[in-house]
Image (cartoon, rainbow, N blue to C red):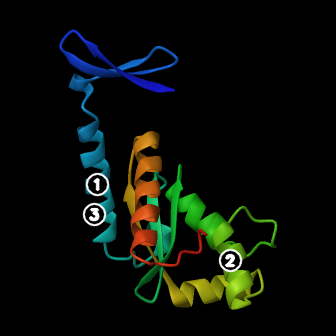
Amino acid sequence: MVYARKGIGGVSLGLAAGFVFTENMNINNISKEAEEKVLQILNKKSVENVKKIPSKQGVYLIYKKSKIIYVGKARNLNRRINNNHLSIGSKGSTSIFRSKIHKIYKKPFGKIMKKWILNNCTFAYEEIEDKDLCSLVEALLIIFLRKKGVKLLND
């Protein structure tokens, strides 16, 4: 539960747990930072070599041709993309992306799927240290793209 109250020095928002956000914390700064990250990733070029994606936290986009088909976040971008999305493992994967490729494009799990992804998809990413900002950027990207009519495999 969130409530607003007039306090010393202006309006503040409080949570039922008692934590108070003041105007000095400025939620607009958080929104601006998230918006900047969204624009940065949307304007990034795809990486040439997925093996060189850093082992850092961030948000990533998967493109098929020039269209974004998937938005994700990861604590370790390299591991998520290379070990999960490009895995040659069976269907027991945690990758929704791979499951959707199997269902929509009828690609069998394993080497055939990995080859298909590498031949048809590209990846772009933005490193984001703060985990909450990372979650916010991922959510904003998904909302923005859906409102633009982009059909994502996230759905």
Tell me where residue 71 appears, x and y as whole percent.
50, 66
Residues 115 and 102: in front is 102
Tell me where residue 30 appears, x and y as whole percent.
30, 40
Q: Residue at x 26, y 26 (%)?
A: 25
Q: Residues within 10 Å of mark 3 (few under 14, many from 20)?
A: few
Q: Amino acid at mark 2?
A: Lys
Which numbered marker is on residue 39? 3
Residues 138 and 61: in front is 138
Tell me where residue 115 appears, x and y as whole percent.
63, 87
Q: Residue at x 27, y 15 (%)?
A: 6
Q: Is residue 133 left or right of 114 when viewed as pictured?
A: left
Q: Residues within 10 Å of mark 1 (few under 14, many from 20)?
A: some
Q: Amino acid at mark 1?
A: Glu
Numbered disc total: 3
Label 2 element class:
helix
Residues 79 and 6: in front is 6
Which numbered marker is on residue 35? 1
Tell which circle, 1 or 2, labels the residue nearer the N-terminal end: 1
Label 3 element class:
helix
Label 1 element class:
helix
Query: Where does label 2 land, which residue?
Result: 100
Tell me where residue 22 appears, x and y as whole percent.
28, 21
Residues under labels 1 and 3: Cα distance?
6 Å
User: Looking at the image, do the residues carrying marks 1 and 3 touch, with CB atoms under 8 Å apart?
Assistant: yes
Residues under labels 2 and 3: Cα distance?
26 Å
Q: Is residue 117 left or right of 98 when viewed as pictured?
A: left
